[in-house]
Amino acid sequence: MGLSNLGIFHTIIGIIAIVAALVSFVKFGKISLGQLAGKIYFYCTVVTALTALGISKHGGFNAGHAFSLFIFVLVLVAFYLYTKRKGYNRARYIENFLLSLSFFLSLVPTVNETFTRVPIGHPIAKDVTDPVIARTLLVLLLLFIAGAVYQFIQQRKLNRSELGGI
């Protein structure tokens, strides 16, 4: 598999982030930064995004590094909205969307790396252009869109009930 110590650490923390996000989605219908699973997702995603900057198959700064920085910014903005814009308001829509988008975007390199490495010796995909990766990412994109719509509807209900049915 050829992972460095940093790569192993990055992978373990990344898996913890994904599991925490899934737990939060199942329990709350969103990544809830007010709950333990959401906090674990946030902190593990920050660490994963930053450790990705020290990993490179091809040497130097590349698209994967830019991707990591983008995910890092998404979770930081969501965290800012969570901490500074309290209550049920429009900021919750953006916060929910940014956290879900960061999760979806985290799955892109996860699928690519996993499918091109596992099982060892006979990976699911030959390279990142393999159709199985494209199909998997398409399904994940559709799930992201459906989840984002669901979260929007749920947040609208919460906002309306908080504002007295407006």
Image: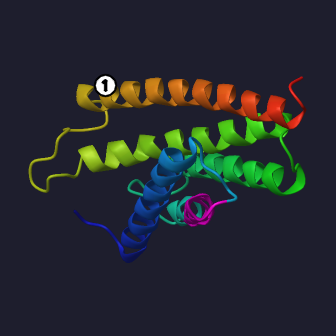
The structure residue drawn at horizontal position 67% and vertical position 25%, both measured from the top left corner, is: 153
State the residue position of label 1. Answer: 135
Does residue 79 appear left or right of residue 149 in this picture? Answer: right
Q: Residue 117: in sight, yes or no?
A: yes
Quadrant containing the C terminus in the rendered view: top right
Q: Which residues are magenta?
A: 35-47
Q: Amino acid at mark 1?
A: Arg
Q: Position of residue 31 (x, y in %)?
A: 60, 48
Does residue 37 appear left or right of residue 91 in this picture? Answer: left
Q: Residue 63: in sight, yes or no?
A: no
The structure residue drawn at horizontal position 43% and vertical position 40%, both measured from the top left corner, is: 108
Q: How many marks?
A: 1
* Label 1 CA crowd tier, 10 Å (few <14, some 14–19, many 20+): few
**Relative to residue 56, is residue 134 depicted above or below?**
above
The residue closer to the viewer here, 5 or 119, is: 119
The quadrant where residue 90 appears? top right
The structure residue drawn at horizontal position 35% and vertical position 43%, both measured from the top left corner, is: 111
Please, what is the dominant secondary structure of the magenta stretch?
A: helix
107 in magenta: no
Quadrant containing the N terminus in the rendered view: bottom left
The structure residue drawn at horizontal position 22% and vertical position 52%, both measured from the top left corner, is: 117
37 in magenta: yes
Q: Position of residue 95 (x, y in %)?
A: 73, 42
Q: Position of residue 27 (x, y in %)?
A: 52, 49
The quadrant where residue 115 appears? top left
Q: Secondary structure at mark 1?
A: helix
Q: Position of residue 118 (x, y in %)?
A: 19, 52
The residue closer to the viewer here, 126 or 163, is: 163
